[in-house]
Amino acid sequence: MSVLVDATTKVLVQGMGKTGRFHTDMAIAYGTNMVGAVHPSRAGQTETFTGETDHSGVVGRADTYDVNVPIFRSVEQAVAETGADASVVYVPPPFAADAIMEAGAAHVPLVVCITEGIPVTDMVKANRFLEDKPTRLVGPNCPGVITPQDCKIGIMPGYIHDSGRIGVVSRSGTLTYEAVHQLTQVGLGQTTAIGIGGDPVNGTDFVDCLTLFNDDPATEGVIMIGEIGGTAEEDAAEWIAANMTKPVAGFIAGTTAPPGKRMGHAGAIISGGKGTAEAKIEALTGAGVVMAPTPTDMGSAMLEALG
Amino acid sequence: MKVHEYQAKALMAARGLPVPLGRVATTVDEAVAAVRPLVEESGNPVVVVKSQIHAGGRGKGRFIEHPDVRGVNVITAGIEGGIEAAEGAVRNLASQMLGSTLVTIQTGPGGKQVSRLYIEQGIDIDRELYLSVLLDRATSRNIVMASTEGGTEIEVVAEETPDKILREEIDPAFGLLDFQANDIAAGLGLEGDAARYGARFMKALSAAAMELDTDLVEINPLVVTKDGRVMALDGKVSFEANALYRHPDVAELRDVTEEDAAELEAGEHGLSFIKLDGDIGCMVNGAGLAMATMDIIKYVGGEPANFLDVGGGADQEQIAMAFKIITGDPNVKGIFVNIFGGIMRCDTIANGVVEAVKDVGLEVPLVVRLEGTNVELGRQILDESGLDLVSATDMKDGARKILELSR
């Protein structure tokens, strides 16, 4: 078991440019079922992917792959032709929010947006548009979602993952990799790892992911990685205290970040005294989350939380 | 991206938002020349001379070179001595303010050099209010925030009298609705014409914020004049960097002299860099990991000299530039390179580090921690480079080693 994506997930890619092509290739090598692409200027063409199988992914495959991915003009057409139930967006920032909304209009159940640098106003509109659609957005500005050995949607390196018992949710890409790597090393593995992204306005949040993991029988514990800015971690702490039945470990980045400065991520900013690492660590500790004092301690914090 | 008050007010005026008359001056003569037309046009004998820097607290700020001069000065000479007396006072002030260093609670002790003044008409103020439009991350919506406590920092109001803060959520599909604007106006105690002008101001400001992709618009104070008009006495606007591509006219307002030279140079090379006060430089891939690297340096007892995220796809040239920027800080006594290779491969980083060190030279200890894609190859490149560097097994190990070596 897992959350959001599994071996049956059929994935569309929106934006078959250089980045989209590269990561589609990596996803196919991993064993993800990439069923189609949306790229209006290339509608009707087929993109062929060949190469050596990434055996850290879906098991029991041949050593090489040769896959044809049809390209469509619109998400609606692509869904009608392929039955896709997830999409991944690599569209450049000026057009990415529209791509998200197009997937919403086509009622794609899961949209994962990797694109970094989408204007906030566009995301405010996109979230408003998705309010009455049966679509869950993950991201933007995130590494994506992976259920090890089943389905990889996004830009994360597949081989550091291992199918296992822990759910991972994070605002930071590389810190997700750190956590995943340590969980693999200590033998816990992951059920699903979700990057919710570093932007101030995103789709799926910590509480959504914690809810999913809490309800997933295969997930035995969760590690959540937050950072300065906003109050999503405080909200998560409140939810954990009231609802979470599984052990949670955590880490918050940005203890040393100066106020008023955007620390790389658009959403990583302490403004008006709000969004400090201290407040988040205090809230999560108060909710019973085992906090790792440094990223090196994330795996051991998870072990400690599991008891 | 921040802009100066005079630029913010010009953008507001262009969208029908009432602001006082004013003229910008970069020389003493320009400042003096602004007085007569302002007094004649406004009919108000008072003029205000305001330092233009990208920091708040100017009114209470003082100049290092002239400790008795404040960052914002009200000239009432025109009331008794006529325009000539006001001009004389402005000449005296402008010659002390221009080129001098203003220290406010937001500039830090080093202050900021004032190279522009804004000469503005005086306003007969009845009430001072607070108004802002900003993103509420929890709801993914912009909100209008208002308070009767104008002139006070909103954080202080929020802390001490949170019930005095009024909020209305802006639905992006509809904008701020009439009844919402009227509710805020009523909540601020505005009546009659002032209520009408206030509501109109809020609607126009909300629309401008959406149109211009602002991060924050803050009018503090928003004033009600003695004759019942509503006007922005100050204006702080910052724009979202990701949306500047669609506002070339706004992008042109950028004043790079207000920004840190190293941060600017890093940005031009696609690197995200922020200078800090410590002595251990760091170079990291990924924003979260870069923050966590600073934190872990502090955790083991050191002080980070910077935040530096080289991003997910940096090439050798960018890594060399990152090294140059870090070593350009004379405070740096050691460098910690912390990489978790995902899409970015460790061998690329290793080659970049080797080339950069050969190019830039290295006079301080260097600790490198590599993990992830092609890590063995990366370590091999570093080992065989003959460079005087120390490898670390994990982040904590690396942080401890660089601290030890730099002491």
Image (cartoon, helix red, strand yellow):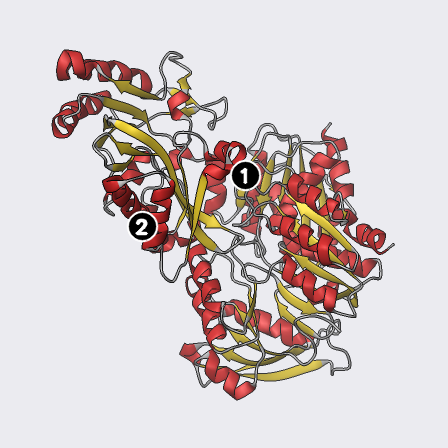
Task: Identify which amino acid the numbered label 1 is placed on.
Answer: Ile
Q: At 40% across and 40% down in the image, what residue appears?
A: B2
Q: Could you tell me which chain the residue with mark 1 belongs to? A: B
Question: Which quadrant would the N terminus of chain A be assigned to in this image?
Answer: bottom right
Q: A253 left or right of A141?
A: right
Task: Identify which amino acid the numbered label 2 is placed on.
Answer: Lys
Q: Which residue is mark 1?
A: B274
The Cα–Cα distance between marks 2 and 1, rounded to whole angstroms, is 36 Å
Q: At 50% across and 43% down in the image, what residue appears?
A: B266
Who comes first in sequence, dot 2 or dot 1? Answer: 2
Q: At 16% across and 27% down in the image, what residue appears?
A: B38
Describe the element under mark 1 as helix, strand or loop.
strand
Return the residue found at the far right: A307
Residue B340 in view in this figure: no
Q: Which residue is mark 2?
A: B203
Describe the element under mark 2 as helix, strand or loop.
helix
